[in-house]
């Protein structure tokens, strides 16, 4: 493992200052369940200067706001979210999703911010191949084994899937995030935070956070009346793995009519994939057992599977059918 | 990799899907080659170049007429041109075949067109002439190819070889030859060049 230096700032401003000083050589260190593994795997792209934000007091909280929504500090542990009575009461689907992330041991360490901004888990990147995210100019996943962790919806240089579950589960609630930047605080939707592979500061990453910015808070608006939501995840192993396909589905229902819908797939694209065609199809329909088939038929029309991963599309469509059936059954 | 200022395109396999049969037919007629045509027009084409000598222009033009230009070619070329990248054809096909190809594909996008007639040679010759004609340094230039032979030619000229990863299995084998990079689709090329620029500290 290369030699690293660790800073322990006590304020967000101080952390931003240190990050700005070291440029892309520095990285934010919170839970470390992604970052430390990249260092141990000797990835060229892993940072040399770690800015440990655990000493910053005001980043670890779950609290209700005046409008009935909930604000979560990004250094909050996933286990704390999974145990939160407030979240269980307001957003049970989110808690369900958090329980499916990794193992209990890792959830005790991993933070919400880390889960949202984690690096992809492509076996070629993690194996040290000189791919796009590791100093090279070729995606080995596009031509190698891409059955588990690569996009079935096309790519942009890198074909790895966005691996996080929390973002997939937060988007249906129209969650917002706050970014602390040298120029002040920026507010974005969660979809804007993780738009998929893009060039930021000369690197390919799944999120828009620049080298000198820190994700500080996720906020969820008050739950809408009549919302039913479900999260399902298919993994190569029964427990403890990243999604081969996942689906966060929420329907706002009044008198059995769907007034609004959110359909977000995980594990199949370089970003949490919001399927607006299905959302639009569902709006105004009566929630019934017959909705599954037509919804599935229009879902993921732009699928572009690689050689070994077309099953991901079948899985995602299966999740859509079962998710709709589940929410219909919750009548 | 240094900042890329120009790209050399070999149309066969990089800008269009060519039918392999005309190239196979040339090999049969001229050199008595036996067996079935390869499924890959690129392999047939580069193999033909290895046999040496003249090829048959009419069959090359026929191959061009049967070629299906990839959907992403025009938007990618337009974006690259807007980025100020020099776009050049460097091919071992004959003048008539390349002229027909450019006319069919994108008559206004290329800044230079080199073929075996005006370059007076095949393989490395069109690449070298294209570099000279555009005053490009090899280090600042890419050559797109989808064959081992193409990668070797790029290396001999000193340009950055970029593997067009049309077929995953073949590309996996070719990736072992350490190309300078690889893309799945031409639409990735502008991002490739932007990334290299950013890595070199340019905006």
Image: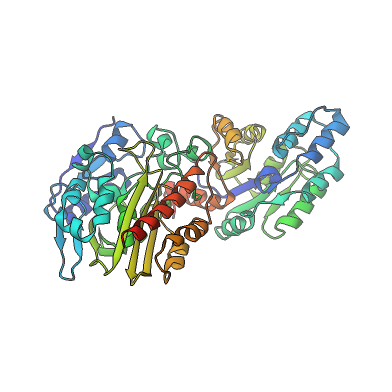
Q: Could you say which is closer to the camera, residue A22 or residue A136? A: A136
Residue B54 image-quadrant placement: top right
Position of the C terminus of chain B, as image quadrant, is: bottom left
Residue B77 visible in image: yes
Residue drawn at x 23%, y 67% is A222
Disc tally is 0
In this rendering, position of residue A57 left or right of residue A248: left
Could you say where residue A271 lies in the image, as x and y percent from the top left?
Answer: 40, 52
Residue A65 image-quadrant placement: bottom left
Position above or below: A234 against B148 = below
Q: Could you say which is closer to the camera, residue B25 or residue B83? A: B25
In this rendering, position of residue B160 left or right of residue A130: right
Q: Could you say which is closer to the camera, residue B63 or residue A202? A: B63
Q: Could you say which is closer to the camera, residue A34 or residue B195? A: A34
Could you say where residue B5 lies in the image, as x and y percent from the top left?
Answer: 56, 50
In this rendering, position of residue A68 left or right of residue B87: left
Residue drawn at x 79%, y 51% is B65
Could you say where residue A60 lies in the image, as x and y percent from the top left?
Answer: 15, 53
Residue A194 visible in image: no
**Is the image coloured rainbow, by chain, by secondary structure, or in one colour?**
rainbow
In this rendering, position of residue A308 left or right of residue B39: left
Could you say where residue B148 lies in the image, as x and y percent from the top left?
Answer: 64, 32
């Amino acid at each position: 493992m290369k030699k690293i230096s660790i800073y322990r700032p006590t304020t967000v401003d101080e952390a931003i200052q240190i990050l700005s000083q070291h440029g892309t050589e520095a990285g934010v260190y919170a839970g470390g369940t992604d970052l430390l593994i990249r260092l141990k795997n000797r990835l060229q792209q892993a940072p040399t200067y770690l800015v440990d934000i655990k000493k910053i007091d005001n980043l670890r909280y779950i609290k209700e706001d005046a409008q009935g929504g909930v604000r979560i500090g990004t250094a909050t542990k996933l286990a704390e979210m999974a145990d939160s009575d407030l979240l269980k009461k307001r957003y049970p689907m989110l808690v369900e999703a958090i329980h499916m992330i990794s193992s209990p041991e890792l959830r005790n360490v991993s933070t919400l911010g880390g889960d949202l901004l984690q690096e992809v888990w492509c076996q070629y990147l993690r194996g040290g191949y000189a791919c796009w995210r590791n100093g090279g100019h070729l995606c080995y996943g596009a031509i190698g084994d891409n059955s588990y962790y690569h996009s079935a919806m096309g790519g942009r240089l890198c074909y790895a899937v966005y691996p996080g579950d929390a973002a997939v589960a937060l988007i249906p609630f129209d969650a917002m995030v706050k970014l602390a930047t040298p120029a002040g605080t920026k507010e974005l939707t969660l979809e804007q935070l993780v738009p998929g592979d893009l060039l930021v500061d000369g690197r390919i990453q799944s999120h828009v956070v620049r080298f000198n910015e820190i994700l500080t808070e996720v906020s969820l608006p008050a739950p809408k009346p009549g919302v039913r939501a479900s999260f399902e995840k298919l993994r190569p192993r029964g427990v403890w793995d990243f999604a081969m396909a996942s689906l966060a589905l929420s329907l706002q229902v009044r008198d059995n009519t769907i007034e609004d819908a959110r359909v977000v797939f995980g594990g199949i694209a370089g970003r949490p994939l919001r399927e607006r065609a299905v959302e639009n199809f569902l709006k105004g329909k009566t929630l019934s057992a017959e909705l599954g088939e037509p919804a599935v038929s229009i879902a993921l029309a732009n699928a572009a599977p690689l050689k070994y991963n077309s099953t991901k599309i079948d899985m995602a469509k299966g999740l859509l059918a079962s998710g709709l059936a589940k929410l219909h059954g919750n009548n | 990799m240094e900042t890329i200022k120009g790209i050399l395109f070999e149309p066969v396999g990089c800008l269009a899907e060519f039918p392999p049969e005309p190239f196979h037919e040339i090999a049969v007629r001229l050199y008595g080659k036996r067996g079935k045509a390869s499924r890959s027009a690129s392999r047939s084409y580069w193999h033909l170049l290895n046999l040496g000598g003249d090829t048959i222009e009419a069959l090359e033009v026929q191959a061009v007429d049967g070629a299906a230009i990839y959907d992403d070619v025009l938007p990618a070329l337009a974006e690259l041109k807007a980025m100020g990248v020099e776009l050049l054809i460097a091919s071992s096909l004959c003048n008539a075949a390349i002229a027909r190809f450019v006319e069919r594909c994108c008559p206004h996008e290329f800044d230079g067109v080199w073929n075996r007639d005006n370059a007076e040679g095949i393989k490395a010759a069109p690449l070298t002439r294209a570099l000279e004609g555009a005053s490009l340094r090899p280090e600042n230039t890419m050559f797109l190819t989808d064959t081992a032979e193409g990668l070797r030619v790029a290396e001999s000229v000193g340009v950055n070889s970029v593997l067009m990863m049309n077929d995953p299995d073949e590309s996996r084998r070719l990736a072992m030859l350490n190309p300078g990079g690889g893309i799945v689709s031409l639409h990735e090329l502008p991002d490739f060049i932007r990334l290299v620029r950013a890595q070199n500290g340019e905006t």
